[in-house]
């Protein structure tokens, strides 16, 4: 029955559910609709038998409210909150405080005030931090372990069976007025009256939410939603379908609300001043400059090193999350910088004092811009931002040749540091971090045994150890246009660097690029072109390194996976390199023996 009511008719009926009818003018003042709209709505409600001649609700109206009243609420709080750098590695966004109250606690209290006691919170990042909510607010927690590799559609799919007359809401919003109530008559999706180019929708004259084109302005999407019976069923069906389709891994749950270019629920438009979405550190700072959550060791460090105040640090923007670190871009006095923050479990993987010694060794050699600041205790690093820089494209022949030339130039410097990067020792170390958990690969034991058989051949080759980058992958070769019109090439990110056979760098470049065998052979040929080519014994050794390094990074991925960081196909491909290049190396070594 509610689907037959227009939004303004539903709102008038809701007001009369709470207030006695006095006059159309008072109804107009309360609802915000014109007297003409109020008059028209009252007439419709009379015609539908929802009001009697005294403007009182009928039995049919009360039945309608009973059918549509809210049953429960789902709060989505699993995400990492990437845009909240630099405070997101210590506090989940839902637990940030604004005016002395945690975001999620305020939402729960507002739900309770509306009579909603059945509340489920879907958690993921720092899930243990939410446990106290069970005791303090009697909520239920559901864990989404896929939060690192999928978007919030996967979170809602975890609890899709309880969607029925349900509020669905993100955990990162602050509502000055309670957006929930004990009586609802129709489903809706909340948007703000403010317009932004970051929105996907706008409200048309029928109060429908329609999709807009790229770079068009739309109504800011708040994300609070109310779903009733029929719409709930549609959403549940779509969640079942979409959650098993990899195409939707990075989609928002709102995708379930669209039929072609329109949402299947109408808009609920609210004032921009009544609700705030807390997406970034700077938004939190603007809303509550006294918030205890604003303290950040990273920002304190920036202020100290660059001789500025915290408020001088602006335009904070997360960069793409790396495999080892989180980094963010920021501006001070009109100049851009990048700060690196070590990622989950990095302290187990990287000795920051060794890293600092590497930067000391390469200083002044033109391999990369020297860091403005590096802390050997916590791994914080500040560097200048270079405009218009790009990474190497491993499918571009010109880029490949430039990168191999850079590698040869670096290797010819024969630099030394006090520490070694031992490939086989690192494999054992990474596996020790699994804490006796078995490998996700059933044949890992056999693969490791085979790879370790290659150790003897590697040691038999004459290899002069020197400073080797170890992580010489395409993403770490940066093409810088420079200020002189020349294209400069930098080799960055020296975290894993140490004394090793420099030919390991060729293998690392190849496996990260996920090259096929012909491409790896071509890469080797480019590197050794100036020497007249690569002999088979060295090629076999590089094949061995491809196998060893494949197992090394596969084991590394397994450790990170246990911390909730997933690398998908990258991990699978590294393991394949270990198995395939054990065979290629063995075949070539046997051929060399036969020829001898």
Image (spheres, rainbow, N blue to C red):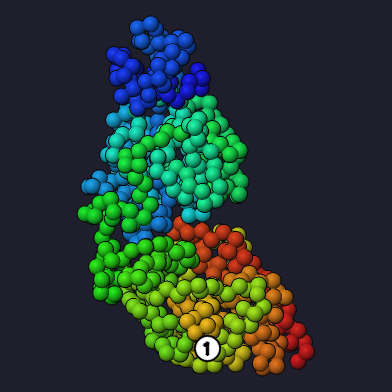
Secondary structure at numbered mark 1? helix
| 366 or 550, nearer to the observer | 366
- Is 2 on the left or on the right of 90, as rendered? right
Furthest-top residue in this view: 53
Against 566, is 543 above or below?
Answer: below
Residue at 35% of width from left, 70% of height from top?
334
Against 554, is 49 above or below?
Answer: above
Against 374, is 26 above or below?
Answer: above
Whole-percent x, y for residue 250 in the image:
54, 51
Answer whether residue 92 is visible to the viewer in this image. no
Residue at 37% of width from left, 63% of height from top?
315
- Is 83 on the left or on the right of 585, as rendered? left
Answer whether residue 320 is visible to the viewer in this image. yes
- Is 119 on the left or on the right of 207, as rendered? left
Which image quadrant is residue 70 in? top left
Residue at 40% of width from left, 67% of height from top?
329
| 246 or 422, nearer to the observer | 246
Against 529, is 189 above or below?
Answer: above
Sort mark 1 into few (<14), some (14-19) or many (20+) by Cα contacts within 10 Å. Answer: many
Residue at 37% of width from left, 36% of height from top?
270
Whole-percent x, y for residue 351 in the image:
39, 76
Whole-percent x, y for residue 368 in the image:
46, 82
Whole-percent x, y for residue 139 in the image:
35, 37
Which residue is the site of mark 1? Answer: 410
The C terminus, quarter of image = bottom right
Which image quadrant is residue 364 in? bottom left
Which image quadrant is residue 182 in? top left
Labels in figure, total: 1
């Amino acid at each position: 029955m509610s689907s037959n009511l227009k939004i303004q008719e539903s709102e008038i009926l809701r007001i009369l559910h709470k207030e006695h009818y006095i006059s159309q003018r008072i109804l107009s003042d309360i609802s915000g609709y014109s007297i003409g709209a109020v008059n028209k709505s009252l007439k419709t409600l009379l015609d539908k038998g929802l009001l009697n001649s005294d403007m009182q609700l009928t039995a049919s109206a009360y039945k309608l409210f009973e059918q549509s009243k809210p049953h429960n609420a789902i709060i989505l709080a699993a995400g990492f909150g990437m845009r909240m750098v630099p405070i997101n590695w210590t506090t989940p966004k839902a637990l940030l405080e604004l005016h002395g109250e945690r975001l999620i606690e305020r939402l729960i209290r507002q739900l309770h005030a509306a009579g909603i006691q059945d509340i489920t919170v879907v958690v993921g990042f720092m899930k243990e931090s939410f446990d106290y909510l069970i005791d303090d607010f009697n909520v239920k927690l559901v864990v989404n372990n896929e939060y690192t590799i999928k978007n919030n559609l996967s979170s809602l799919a975890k609890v899709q069976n309880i969607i029925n007359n349900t509020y669905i809401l993100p955990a990162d919003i602050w509502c000055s007025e309670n957006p929930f109530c004990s009586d609802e008559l129709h489903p809706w999706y909340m948007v703000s009256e403010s317009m932004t180019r970051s929105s996907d929708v706008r409200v048309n004259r029928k109060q429908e939410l329609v999709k807009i084109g790229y770079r068009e302005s739309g109504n800011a999407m708040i994300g609070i939603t109310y779903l009733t019976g029929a719409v709930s069923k549609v959403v549940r069906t779509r969640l079942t379908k979409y959650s098993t389709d990899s195409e939707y891994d990075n989609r928002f749950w709102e995708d379930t609300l669209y039929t072609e270019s329109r949402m299947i629920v109408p808009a609920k438009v609210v004032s921009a001043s009544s609700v705030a979405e807390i997406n970034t550190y700077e938004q939190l700072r603007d809303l509550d400059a006294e918030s205890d959550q604003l303290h950040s060791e990273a920002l304190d460090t920036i202020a100290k090193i660059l001789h500025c105040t915290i408020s001088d640090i602006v335009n904070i923007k997360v960069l793409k999350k790396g495999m080892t670190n989180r980094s963010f871009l920021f501006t001070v006095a009109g100049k851009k910088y990048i700060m690196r923050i070590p990622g989950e479990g990095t302290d187990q993987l990287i000795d920051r004092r060794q890293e600092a010694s590497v930067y000391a060794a390469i200083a002044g050699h033109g391999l990369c811009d020297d860091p403005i600041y590096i802390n050997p205790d916590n791994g914080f690093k500040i560097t200048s931002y270079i405009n218009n820089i790009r990474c190497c494209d491993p499918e571009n022949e010109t880029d490949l040749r430039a990168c191999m030339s850079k590698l040869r130039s670096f290797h010819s410097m024969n630099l030394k540091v006090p520490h070694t990067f031992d490939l086989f020792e690192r494999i054992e170390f990474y596996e020790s971090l699994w804490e006796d958990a078995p490998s996700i690969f059933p044949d890992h034991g056999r693969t490791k045994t085979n790879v370790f058989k290659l150790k003897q051949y590697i040691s038999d080759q004459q290899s002069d150890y020197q400073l080797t980058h170890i992580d010489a992958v395409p993403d770490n070769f940066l093409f810088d246009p420079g200020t002189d019109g020349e294209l400069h090439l930098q080799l960055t990110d020296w975290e894993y660097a140490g004394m090793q056979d420099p030919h390991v760098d060729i293998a690392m470049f190849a496996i990260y690029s996920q090259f096929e065998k012909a491409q790896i052979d071509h890469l080797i040929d480019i590197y050794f072109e100036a020497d007249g080519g690569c002999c088979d014994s060295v090629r076999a050794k590089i094949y061995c390194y491809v196998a060893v390094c494949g197992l090394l990074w596969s084991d590394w991925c397994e450790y990170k996976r246990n911390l909730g960081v997933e690398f998908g196909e990258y991990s699978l491909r590294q393991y394949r390199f270990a198995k395939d290049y054990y065979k290629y190396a063995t075949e070539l070594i046997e051929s060399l023996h036969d020829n001898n």
